[in-house]
Image (cartoon, rainbow, N blue to C red):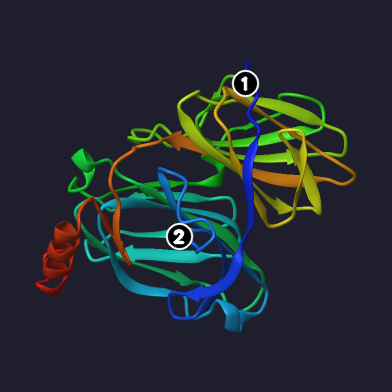
Amino acid sequence: MTERSILRRIRGMDTSDGAGVRLKRIIGQPGLDMVDPFLLLDEFRSDQAGDYIAGFPEHPHRGFETVTYMLAGHMQHGDNHGNRGDLGPGSVQWMTAGRGILHSEMPQQENGLMWGFQLWVNLPASDKMTAPRYQDIAPDRIPVVHPSDGVEVRVIAGELDGAVGPVNGIATAPIYMDIAVQPGAQIEIPLPEGHSGFAYVFDGTDASVAGERLGRSELAVLSKGDSVRVAGRDAAARVLLVAGKALKEPVARYGPFVMDTPEQIHEAIADFRAGKF
């Protein structure tokens, strides 16, 4: 295997979104606009209700996918097509917005820890106007494997050690894994050669990624290669490992709309205002 190395590092920046939810933006900030096909990565984590209670009221999306991974807390999602669902600890929602949807995610708690991620994944030009769909995945549907001593991996998308993640039918053929490593433990994760990838340390003080120390709340953009090594250092840690097929297509972005040209963005705004979502 050709091991990947770290091309660059970046730390999340504090910001807010929705109706004032405080979060850390890692991808989609001035220092790291995107990692094709990934447009945005936010981590929200707080046990102060004022940081999250206002949630993400109804808002539009077109042209990409949103992935919500809950670690703690409880959110309810709904949309203008009548879909409803609950997102509790360990659950995942992979929403393909396609040609347009009005969507909300609202906290279902008034105290306690709310912790999780939202990832935006671009859609290829051929799928921008596809029909919206959801993959709502309960925690017990996500396989957990122990490929080596001191390593536990939740396989959300992709395949590892015979376990296949429940997310399917996604154009970018994603890999999405939550890797927990104990001190001194290590694992080499195979990744498709043509996939862009990143690793993000979200629990513990640090971890070793591609042979280098990566601190808490630090993201590493990975080089080309067909594997990456993740290892524990002095304390237990958890690492989010994500990879996907780069689309290498033009990207036109305006808030919740991601298309290929400015003209398509204008069309999206007009359709939203006309109530066509």
Task: Provide the secondary structure element on which disc 2 rests.
Answer: strand
- Residue closest to the eye, 228 or 30: 30
Residue 153 place in picture, x, y as percent: 66, 35
Gap in angstroms between the C-alphas marked 1 and 2: 30 Å
Is 145 situated above or below 47?
A: above
For image coordinates 19% across by 60% down, the residue present is: 262
Q: Quadrant of residue 183?
A: top right
Tell whether 57 sits left or right of 48: left
Among all residues in the image, which is located at the extreme top?
1
Q: Amino acid at mark 2?
A: Asp
Residue 121 visible in the displayed image: yes
For image coordinates 54% across by 65% down, the residue present is: 74
Residue 89 place in picture, x, y as percent: 59, 56
| Nearest to viewer (mark 1 / mark 2) | 1
- Crowding at dot 1, Cα within 10 Å, few <14 / some 14-19 / many 20+, comes out as few
Task: Provide the secondary structure element on which disc 1 rests.
Answer: loop
- Residue closest to the eye, 91 or 268: 268
Tell whether 147 sits left or right of 185: left
Count of marks overlaid on the render:
2
Q: Amino acid at mark 1?
A: Asp
Residue 175 visible in the displayed image: no
Tell whether 4 sits left or right of 175: right
**Mark 1 near mark 2, Cβ–Cβ under 8 Å?**
no
The residue carrying mark 1 is: 161
- Crowding at dot 2, Cα within 10 Å, few <14 / some 14-19 / many 20+, comes out as some
- Residue 86 disc label: 2
Residue 105 place in picture, x, y as percent: 42, 67
Among all residues in the image, which is located at the extreme right?
234
Q: Quadrant of residue 103?
A: bottom left
Q: Mark 1 or mark 2: which comes first in sequence?
A: 2
